[in-house]
Amino acid sequence: MSLLKNNPLMIVMVKELTDLFRDRRTMMVSLLMGPLLMPALILGIGKLASNRIITQLEKPLEVPVVGAEHAPNLIAWLEGQNIVVKKPPVDVEAVIANQSEDVILRIDANYGKQWRGSKPAGVEIVHDSSRQDAQIPVQRVTTLLENYSQSVGTLRLLARGVSPSTMQPLRINRVDMATPESRVGQALAFLPYLLILTGFLGGAYLVIDATAGERERSSLEPLLATPAPRAVIMSGKIMAACAFGLISLTLTMVMFKISFLFAPGLGVKIDVSTWAVARILLVMVPMVLIGTCLLTLIAAGAKSVKEAQSYMSVLMLLPMIPTIVLMVNPVKNELWMMATPFLAQNQMILKLVRSEAITSAEWLVYLAAGFGAGLVLWILAARRYHDERLAISA
């Protein structure tokens, strides 16, 4: 208690946290939204992926076939491969365009003549490559046709006394070095964005209310008139927001661990140990500091809570940029990336999720750049608090 009485920094920090926790509804929404949203997304996405695999890979696939009468042997073989042959539609292109069918097989009218002449027989797979939901059915049909073509080609060579191996001058073997963790990490490209957004805006409500809110309520001016230095007052508010953001982020990471343990097919492939979760939390600490200081700097220039909240929509786009760029244009990890805000967090989280090693140099550059950027924003926010216009209410 004596430390609290003689320390203006701690007094401001405790005061802001006390005010926040008095508003129970707002506190619950701010504190629990991330932890509740995370397991819902993880479990929901895992369930959807599992259902899609069962639905599109295991059940019989219905495929309309145009010109089925031209290739009875092919049709009979496909029906033995879990394919249900349907009557073709009148307008093939229209059916694909309106998404009534995922894939349609069209057999050339000269198929029989070409087949008897040992020439390549024409078969078309009609589909829309821009539709993601049609990718699995199209791949199934394509793979079956390729297998059928290879089998018939082998039989033709044997019938002519030619070894099928003469058609394969090269034997190509693929050595896939991907681990189960890296494959799942690739599928969870959205995860860094969720974590970065949670850390970046975790203390947003407290920052906006403690600065723009108090300015709008005309309660900031008496606080700035106290003997405590303005930089100390500002620092106390930032520390309170950082503490709240870290609490929210910790709860989110705990639910992140639980959700992956129970998510179908994911819990055994991703490292969700306490050590892994602790390292992700360490990665997010600089982002919490950067987000809090940046929001303090912006909110200090806003005259009302509404104005400060209007900047939130723009700030929410910042963590999204690296995720979108890396999905469209994947790049190899370079040391300079660890000094780039948002991109560094994205790469570090992906490395941890994929169970990849992070070098000492990468940790050093990342932490130095992250805390350095937070310190710069802290200094800029402290200068903003020395502006006499800050004490003037809206």
Image (cartoon, rainbow, N blue to C red):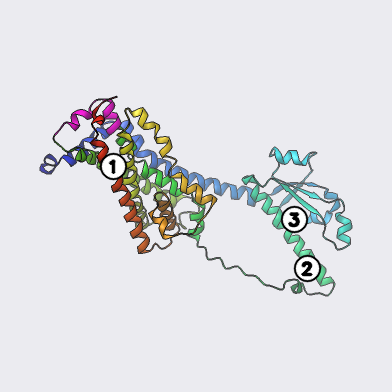
On whether residue 216 falls in the magenta region, the answer is: yes
The secondary element bearing badge 2 is classed as: helix
In x, y percent, where is residue 297?
31, 38
Image quadrant containing the N terminus: top left
The mark found on residue 80 in the picture is 3
Query: In whole angstroms, how far apart are the C-alphas of marks 3 and 1?
Result: 71 Å
> Would residue 190 be seen by someone viewing this image from the given angle?
no
Query: In whole angstroms, how far apart are the C-alphas of marks 3 and 2?
Result: 20 Å
Circle 3 packing at 10 Å, graded few (<14), some (14-19), many (20+), is few
Check disc 3 and give the amino acid type: Gly
Circle 2 packing at 10 Å, graded few (<14), some (14-19), many (20+), is some
Q: Read off the residue under disc 2.
A: 154
**Residue 331 relative to residue 130: left or right:** left
**Residue 257 relative to residue 4: left or right:** right
Check disc 2 and give the amino acid type: Thr
On whether residue 343 falls in the magenta region, the answer is: no
* Nearer-N-terminus badge (3/2): 3
Residue 300 occupies quadrant:
top left
Residue at image coords 86%, 59%: 115
Q: Which residue is at the front of the view, 335 or 88?
A: 335
Q: Read off the residue under disc 1.
A: 380
Q: Which residue is at the front of the view, 128 or 30?
A: 128
Check disc 1 and give the amino acid type: Leu
Q: Is residue 223 above or below residue 178?
A: above
